[in-house]
Each structure stands twice: as C-alpha cells, then as structure tokens.
Amino acid sequence: MEAAIRASAQVVSDYRRLFVNRLAYTLQSMRPHTESGRHYYFRPEAKGTGKALGLTSATLQRHLEGEITIGLYSINPATQRSKWVAIDADYDGAMEDLLKLQYHLLKDSVDAALEMSKRGGHLWIFMEKPALARDCRIYIYNLALRLGVQIKAAGLGEGIEIFPKHDELRPGEFGNAMRGPLGVHRGANRRYWFYGADYDLEKQMAYLNRLRKISEDQLRRFIAGKTLPREFERKHPPLDDRVHSLPATGREFRILDHVGKVRKVGRNYVTRCPSCAETGHDRGGDNLAISIEDPRKYLCWAGCTREMIRRAVGCPIPVRRTA
Ligand SMILES: [Zn+2]
C-alpha cells in the first residue's frame, strides 16, 4: 500500500467542482464478498434512520486520501445534466480504442483525460457548464460509431461503455455510477492516476483544471443534425420494470417471482440464492430467506447484497458497478 496521501481543501474543492453533480453516491465495500471475492458498491445510509447519505467534502477528502472509495453519478436528476462524460473500456485492445477517441476528440478541440484502471482505462471529458445528458451521449456515441469503436450493447460482446448511460432519470432513479477518479480501487488495492500529470494529487488536479472544457456552443455544433443511434436509446427503463410499477412507491420488485421452489422454515421461505447460484454456490438451496409476512424483505445468509441478488435475477437496482 502507498504512503499516506493528504488532500488539501483546495484539491477537495476542485474535485467537487469537476466531478460532483449530485449528492447521492456509492461506496465500495472494504472487504471482498465471501464468495465472489469482489468489492461491491452500495449506497451508504445513515445508521438508524436508513436515510441515504449525501456526499460531503469530508467524504471526498477521505476518498482522495484513500481511506474509502466512492462512486459518482453523472446525471443530476433535477436538471438531467451532466458535468462530465466518462468512457470506460476494459477489454483487450481497450487502450487503443481510448487513445483513438482521445486523438479524435482533440481534433474537435476537446481535451480528454485518460485515467488508468484495473484493465484498460477511463477517458474523462468535462463540460464548461453541465450539459444535457442526452446531448453528451449523442456526441460521444456518434463519434465512437464514426471511428468504428465498438460500443457495448446490453449482453453483447465487448466494447466501450459511455457514462451517462441514460438520457434522463425519473424520480428515484440514479443511473450508473463511476468509480471516483484518484481514489484507491479496493479490489486492486491501489490508486489509479491520470496519465497526463505526475502522480501526486495537487499535480493531477492542476492538470484536470487546465483541460479545455466543452462549451455549450461547441456541443451544439458537434451534435447538429445528429440523434442517438437507435440501438443505444436508453430513454426509459426497460418495459418489464414498468409492468410491475405501483404508483405510490415506484416500481415494486417481488423476489418470489424470480426464485425457484421455496420451502417454509419458521417465519421465512427458504430457497437457493440466485446470486450464490451464479457462482455455483448454495447447492443446498437454503441461503436465501424471504419473509413470509412481507416478501419484500429477503436476505442471503452468505452475505450477498440486495444489489447482487437483483442483478443475478436480471432486475438490477439502478446502482451499478463502478468500473
Ligand atoms: Zn447469496
């Protein structure tokens, strides 16, 4: 592990200005999941009240100093705007694709910062003022298509992923989070830097501050006459989600619709945990307990989170990985 790094108040405030566009965030678990070995992200809640915690400067400082690792959401739901676009690539040949994008962005007079990651990298582009998520997406999707850079489509092959992943959010939605740059990746237990500056917080932030940001005018010019390629339209959540929606509480997910045979044990139904099952575990079929009285409540004894279980049954809670 690296020596202690201190983040100054200036670094924290620059970081907030560049990267934070809404106060909801995710936190990477410090310990790997017992079965998958992965460090999952969850949305932190206040102890006792269960209220979602908002991002504070103190939290950002702890992230930058490597004590915790957070994920950031791109879209502010009040404005449907984003301060940045991040392109995530983590397949063979990912770096070539990112460098190609970076080169062609530069031809548009757009500076893009390349950040290392566990496999491949992340390319970050900043807006002078928050821009509509939809417009950001139209620009980058069209650029990638023009350059022949493969974009990952649901369940199909490899390719870049572009954040924001949605045009807009509806109340209660979060979209997808990205690992906050310059923090320590828990899985890799190391910090990933931007290539563009020395590996030191002050110099990295000075570099990011110096980058040219896309102006409203520029973006308007880039997307004139363009639309989002149809196969990548993600304006609304999938239809299935809406079928189950209840007006009062938003969508209602019922775990019982998604598990195999259950048996009654005391006050619970017990069945195989779908998340454990993915990795061939829980052969005894008794890791998942579902409350009979209130089947909205369920728990995996092996420690799978709700997020993992929802993802395993193909109905992910909209807080996803952070690359
Ligand atoms: Zn499980």
Image: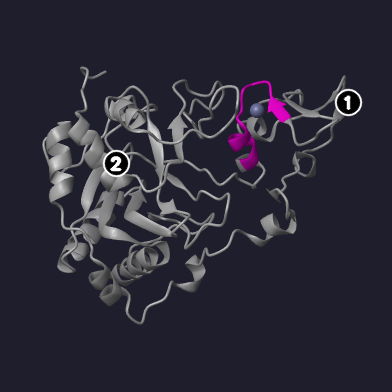
Which label number is shown at residue 5?
Answer: none
Q: Secondary structure at mark 2?
A: helix
Q: How many marks?
A: 2
**Residue segment shown in magenta:** 298-310
The quarter holding residue 102 reads bottom left
Mark 2 highlights which residue? 16
Query: Depth check: 214 or 155 in front?
Result: 214
The quarter holding residue 294 reads top right
Kind of residue at badge 2:
Arg
Kind of residue at badge 1:
Lys
Q: Secondary structure at mark 1?
A: strand
The quarter holding residue 136 reads bottom left
For the point 35% across and 49% down, the residue is 88
Which label number is shown at residue 264?
Answer: 1
Q: Is residue 104 found left or right of 76 in the rendered image?
A: left
Circle nearer the viewer, 1 or 2: 2
Residue 104 is inside the magenta segment: no
Q: CA distance from mark 1 to mark 2?
A: 50 Å
Q: Is residue 317 found left or right of 274 in the rendered image?
A: left
Give the mark nearest the N terminus, 1 or 2.
2
Q: Is residue 121 visible?
A: no
Image location of residue 257, percent across then percent down: 79, 44
Displayed-image quarter of ligand 1: top right
Image location of residue 221, percent across then percent down: 26, 76
For the point 43% across and 72% down, the residue is 228
Query: Depth check: 287 or 20 in front?
Result: 20
Q: Is residue 228 visible?
A: yes
Residue 304 is inside the magenta segment: yes
